[in-house]
């Protein structure tokens, strides 16, 4: 709502045929990543966690010690119009092949043009949302953000991620979730008929933190960390609440409406500085208390578990665990 100067289609808007379109520009705009670019990630809390985790896990000294010359492979599941594909390719350059898949053909068409415009090479494909068109154990890392909540068969979808990911491979995910026990204002409103989920029309699979952990475990993933996002959403994302208040009876929630209106006007009139400050706050919140909160949505950092036989083929991983 505050991206007046953004020439993209928008983030989470309804496109032709009623599908939800996700279109944004990459964080890294120049040919090479500079210190300024790295600092920009501070204003993208989810990407800050997910990008850094993939980069850290794939460039560890244990992997370098194997002296493998092969190219790393990274898969973006639900790549939208390719912003994250471009960012990941710029992060790794020739060291990695980056592939993106999505179920919306329009998004893939836009992604191909955007990839060319940003001067990188990466492959993006349309897939059916159920069967990934890749062989078993063919990727070193999987990145996926804001996708799980849109999937009908979550168990099958996670099994597919596990199938194409190598044992010990990296999983970096953001998943929408049910409202947790610490989402006080949102739970208060939901019990009174106002769902503040900005994409509630499209979310069909939302789970609690415990349920998400169990589904990931069953699919073969070991979760290292989970960070809940934006406990103070009422204060830093007033635009999401404003939309729902507009749909409700104007005589209800007078005090909350008034506070929301003031916050919304302040954020809109001070954009982009107010938006940047709110996102920076979000990162600080996630770092300080995100692992202990249950709100609505989680950054999930983990890997595909390995059995004893698989560990013999990945000694660098076994050694790192024993340290």
Image (tube, rainbow, N blue to C red):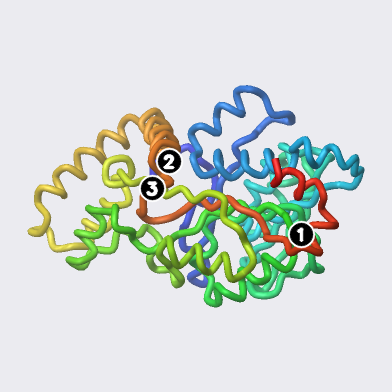
Q: Residue 3 lies in what quarter of the image?
A: top left
Q: CA distance from mark 1 to mark 2?
A: 29 Å
User: How many residues crowd around disc 2 within 10 Å: few (fewer than 14), some, or many (20 or more)?
Assistant: many
- Mark 3 Cα shell of 10 Å, populated few (<14), some (14-19), many (≥20): few
Near-viewer residue (226 or 132) = 226
Q: Are marks 2 and 3 in contact (CB under 8 Å)?
A: no
Q: Position of residue 165 (x, y in %)?
A: 73, 61
- The image shows residue 295, relative to residue 69, as above or below, that is below
Camera-side residue: 9 or 203?
203
Local crowd size for mark 1, using a 10 Å CA cut-off: few (<14), some (14–19), many (≥20): many
At x 56% / y 26%, what residue is drawn?
39
Q: Quadrant of residue 32?
A: top right
Labelled disc at residue 166 = 1
**What element does badge 2 sit on?**
helix
CB under 8 Å between discs 1 and 2: no
Q: Earlier in the sequence, mark 1 or mark 2?
A: 1
Residue that carries the numbered disc 3 in the rendered image: 292
User: Which of pointers 2 and 3 lies earlier in the amino acid sequence?
Assistant: 2
Tell us which disc is closer to us: 3 or 1.
Answer: 3
Separation of marks 2 and 3 at Cα, in angstroms: 9 Å
Marking on residue 262: none
Question: Which residue corresponds to mark 2?
Answer: 286
- Visible residue check, residue 110: no
Instruction: Tell which of 43 and 217 is nearer to you.
Output: 217
For the C terminus, give its image quadrant.
top right
- State the residue at coordinates (51%, 67%): 214
Is 209 rendered above or below residue 34?
below
Could you say where residue 106 lies in the image, as x and y percent from the top left?
A: 63, 62
Q: Residue at x 40, y 64 (%)?
A: 208
How far apart are the two marked residues, 3 and 1, measured between alpha carbons? 30 Å
């Amino acid at each position: 709502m505050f991206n007046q100067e953004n020439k993209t289609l928008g983030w989470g808007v309804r496109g032709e045929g009623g599908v939800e379109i996700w279109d944004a520009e990459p964080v890294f705009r120049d040919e090479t990543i500079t210190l300024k670019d790295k600092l920009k990630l501070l204003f993208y809390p989810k990407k800050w966690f997910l990008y850094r985790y993939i980069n850290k896990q794939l460039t560890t000294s244990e992997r370098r010690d194997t002296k493998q010359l092969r190219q790393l492979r990274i898969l973006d599941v639900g790549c939208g119009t390719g912003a994250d594909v471009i960012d990941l390719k710029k992060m790794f350059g020739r060291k990695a092949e980056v592939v993106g898949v999505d179920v919306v053909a329009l998004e893939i068409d836009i992604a191909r043009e955007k990839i060319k415009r940003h001067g990188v090479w990466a492959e993006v494909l349309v897939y059916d949302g159920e069967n990934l068109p890749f062989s078993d154990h063919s990727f070193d890392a999987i990145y996926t953000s804001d996708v799980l909540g849109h999937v009908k068969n979550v168990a099958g979808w996670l099994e597919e991620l596990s199938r194409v990911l190598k044992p010990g491979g990296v999983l970096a995910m953001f998943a929408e979730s049910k409202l947790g026990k610490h989402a006080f204002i949102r739970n208060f409103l939901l019990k009174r008929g106002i769902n503040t989920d900005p994409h509630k029309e499209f979310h069909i699979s939302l789970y609690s933190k415990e349920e998400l952990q169990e589904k990931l475990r069953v699919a073969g993933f070991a979760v290292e960390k989970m960070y809940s996002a934006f406990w103070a959403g009422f204060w830093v994302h007033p635009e999401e609440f404003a939309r729902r208040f507009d749909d409700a009876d104007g005589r209800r929630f007078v005090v909350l409406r008034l506070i929301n209106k003031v916050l919304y006007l302040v954020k809109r009139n001070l954009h982009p500085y107010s938006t940047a400050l709110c996102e920076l706050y979000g990162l600080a919140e996630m770092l300080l208390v995100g692992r202990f909160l249950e709100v609505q949505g989680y950054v999930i950092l983990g890997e595909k578990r390995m059995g004893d036989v698989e560990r013999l083929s990945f000694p660098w991983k076994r050694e790192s665990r024993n340290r």
